Amino acid sequence: MKKDIHPVSHKVVFKDVSCDFAMLTSSTLSSNETIKWEDGNEYPLIKFDISSQSHPFYTGQQRMLDTEGRAEKFRKRYGIKKPKA
């Protein structure tokens, strides 16, 4: 294998700013911000907007859209007849 072509992996804290959920993991990303983790060490901090703790699909708050009603509304608006089965 060629030397010095792979990025350096190190410990990083990813933090969901919408619900204050944070996790320590290994990543190639880096940041100027740092955070003191539960083990007493400081790690680079990467902030993001949504995670499994705040995403509607995983929290059970997802709503299903009425796609059949939307299709019928489109057909009515543009005069398209319903296809025969």
Image: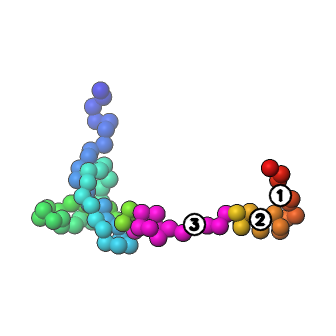
Looking at the image, tell me whether mark 2 or mark 1 is earlier in sequence order: 2
Q: Residue 72 shows which numbered tag? A: 2
Q: CA distance from mark 2 to mark 1?
A: 8 Å
Residue 63 is inside the magenta segment: yes
Residue at 47% of width from left, 70% of height from top? 61
Question: Circle 2 sits in a helix, a strand or a loop, which is it?
Answer: helix
Residue at 31% of width from left, 43% of height from top? 7
Task: Give the magenta range.
Answer: 54-67
User: What type of secondary structure mainly makes up the magenta span?
Assistant: loop
Residue at 86% of width from left, 60% of height from top? 80
Q: Amino acid at mark 1?
A: Lys
- Please state the horizontal and vertical placement of residue 41, each as a whole percent of the image: 14, 61
- Please state the horizontal and vertical placement of residue 54, each as a whole percent of the image: 40, 68
Asked if the residue at tag 1 contacts the one at tag 2, i.e. Cβ–Cβ closer than 8 Å, the answer is: yes
Q: CA distance from mark 2 to mark 3?
A: 17 Å
77 and 3: which is toward the camera: 77
Q: Taking 3 as reference, is 9 above or below it?
A: below
